Image: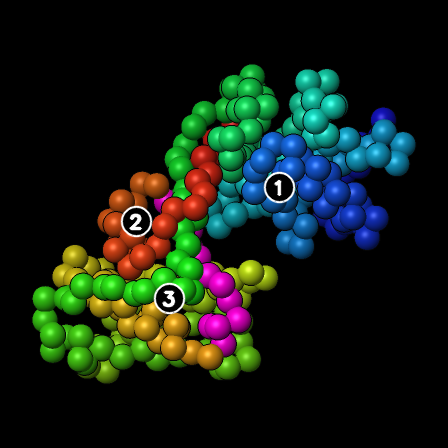
Amino acid sequence: MNLYRTNTLSQIQKQDLLKLQNICRNHDKISVTLPVEEDCIYCLLYNEEILLSALCGFFNENGDCECGAFTLPEHRRKGHFSRLLKEMIKETKDTDIVFPVDLRCSDTLGVLEEIGASFWYQEHIMELPLSSLLITPAVNSQKRVNNLELSIASTPEEIPIQCVFLLDGEAVGSCFLDTQEHGAYFYGFEISEPLRNQGLGTACLSLFLETYFAHPNAKRFKKLFLQVSGLNQPAIALYKKAGFQITESLSYYVY
């Protein structure tokens, strides 16, 4: 067997990695994927021309190394992942290694328990179908809603799109929208801290969704989706009120 460590995948390695990913996703009935386009550390274990196991990691904004791994179902429990993890540790040194996990995969949970990884938190993917009717309650002050505007801070050709919320001409919040293959990804939604817990978040989200759903380009997408921490219950409640539903949950483990 040959172990390869690289920061740049060859075309053949990328194809092998995607093939391995598809086999494991279908076998385990999960939707998690490996990053193949980002600046990652790739540890690949081959038996001749067959990719048996892969571990991919990248350093996130918190300085942690976020990793994903797949091993062919018939080659599990043979120490392949442990071998790749030792190689990854040489790169990460004392940095925490974080594993996003779909709880439907019992093999992954078993491996994490064996290496002593500990549960950190959950993150949810929420979706709003284009066909959904938007029903968002009004905020306390009708005047505040009337004076609320949405400004596009980026140029039309820029992706992602940055949106800024203006109240009486003053910026009070912002969000981003990125286009994906099957939908649009909504992220970075925040309200200025002094103005939180006053119903402004509901009004801004409502204004954004009304603007988004009215735009002709939105019709080419079937859904709008976002990610939110399971610890952020106020945000989850806000998104549910706007019609978003949780479609997938990932649990994060730290090693």
Viewer can see residue 85 = yes
Front disc: 1 or 3:
3
Residue at 72%, 45% (x, y): give it: 18
Q: CA distance from mark 1 to mark 3?
A: 27 Å
- First reached walking from the N terminus: tag 2 or tag 1: 1
Question: What kind of element bears circle 1?
Answer: strand
Left or right side of 106 for 27: right
Residue 145 x, y percent position in the rendering? 18, 75
Residue 65 x, y percent position in the rendering? 55, 40
Q: Is residue 98 above or below residue 14?
A: above
Residue at 85%, 29% (x, y): give it: 47
Q: Is residue 79 above or below residue 9?
A: above
Question: Residue 123: which quarter of the image?
Answer: top left
- First reached walking from the N terminus: tag 3 or tag 2: 3
Viewer can see residue 98 = no
Question: Residue 33: which quarter of the image?
Answer: top right
Q: Which mark is residue 57?
A: 1
- First reached walking from the N terminus: tag 1 or tag 3: 1
Whether residue 101 appears in magenta in the rendering, the answer is no
Return the residue nearer the eye: 64 or 52. 52
Front disc: 3 or 2:
2
Specify the farthest residue to the right.
48
Residue type, label 3: Cys
Question: What kind of element bears circle 2?
Answer: helix
Q: Mark 3 sits on what residue?
A: 175
Residue type, label 1: Gly
Question: What kind of element bears circle 3?
Answer: strand
Q: CA distance from mark 3 to mark 2?
A: 16 Å
Q: Which mark is residue 236?
A: 2
Return the residue nearer the eye: 171 or 26. 26
Which span is picked out in magenta? 217-229
